[in-house]
Image (cartoon, rainbow, N blue to C red):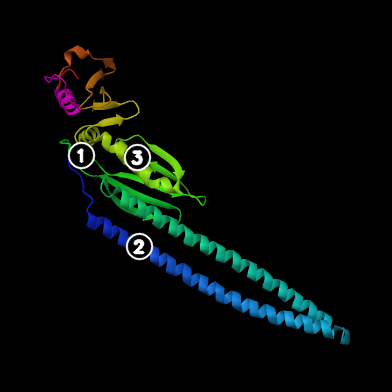
Amino acid sequence: MTGFLCTGNEAHSRWKVLKSEYKEGVQEVEALISTLQDRMDKLHHKRDRLTNLVTALENKKDLSLQMGESLQTAYNALRVCEGQLAQLRMETDATLDRSADWQHLRDALQGYVEETQGVMQCRLLSVGSSELCVELRPRSCGSSSGQLEPLRLTVTWSPDDHFHLQVYQGTAGLLEVSMKGCLSHLSAALLEVMQCYTSQGEMLAEIQALHSRFAIDWRPGQRLLVFLKTASSVCNLGVEEGYPSRGTATLISVRRDGELVDNAVLQPPQKTPSLTEWLEFLSSSPYV
């Protein structure tokens, strides 16, 4: 099987894009923090002036009963100012948290690229504030059956530095995978998923190629391949662990018009037929 090689230049180019995105995020955060700081300084100055006013009014309140209303107005303005300062502190904390999220994302992606560039090709499809979508394509595994389709998966992470990785079966033929763990273990989790995929590479590449030729349904949990020859003819083939090097594909059952067909009359000329040979034989057999 041929595959897509991840070159050093491609990994470096991808990293430059990620680095640029990270720098833009940091610049945005720094600009926002500077604006918030200016506003806080102005409010501090305003609060000082109001405090001085309150002090002056307190000293003069005995001189005029009318000063009481002005004093209350100043107190109210001071409370509003304190509330605005508290709100700005919350906004500043949220901005700093956003900056930390960018840092975590950058570190996770950098570690992933460094650890996986010799094993697979990675394409970042999208990045959100707490989610990214990645396409993984293994390098060539030496199979003659074809090349493996890329795996698409999503990774989400939470404020407590944990991730949730979800791989969907699609047409790739791999069991749906869901993994959770610390964000620092994300690279290891991605490698584990890809190693599981490539360990079944020759079988999955053959099944993926058969999808374009026959009406089939691969059920990885049962290791069962269902071949729909016609609307009334259905064949079930079992695939042993280790296929094709250490396992075989066998015909389990054939139903035609709802009736079981005798498997004894259905045997390809090959001693240990592959899935492709089985389907080619069954598609041309008059008994099916």
Query: Which residue lies under the disc numbered 3?
Result: 192
> Residue 118, how many percent across, how many down?
25, 48
| Identity of the residue drawn at 48% across and 59% down | 100
Residue identified by numbered label 2: 19
The residue segment tinted magenta is 268-284
Residue 149, visible in the rendered structure: yes
In the rendered image, residue 48, in percent from the top left (x then y), is placed at: 69, 80
**Left or right of 167, for residue 268:** left
| Closer-to-camera residue (157/283) | 157
Give the spatial CA distance, label 3 vs label 2. Answer: 26 Å
**Hey, which quadrant is residue 178 in on the image?**
top left
Q: Which residue is mark 1?
A: 141
Q: Is residue 230 visible?
A: no
Amino acid type at image mark 1? Cys
Q: Amino acid at mark 2?
A: Lys
Determine the image quadrant of residue 139.
top left
Q: Is residue 258 above or below residue 124?
A: above
Residue 185: name its quadrant. top left
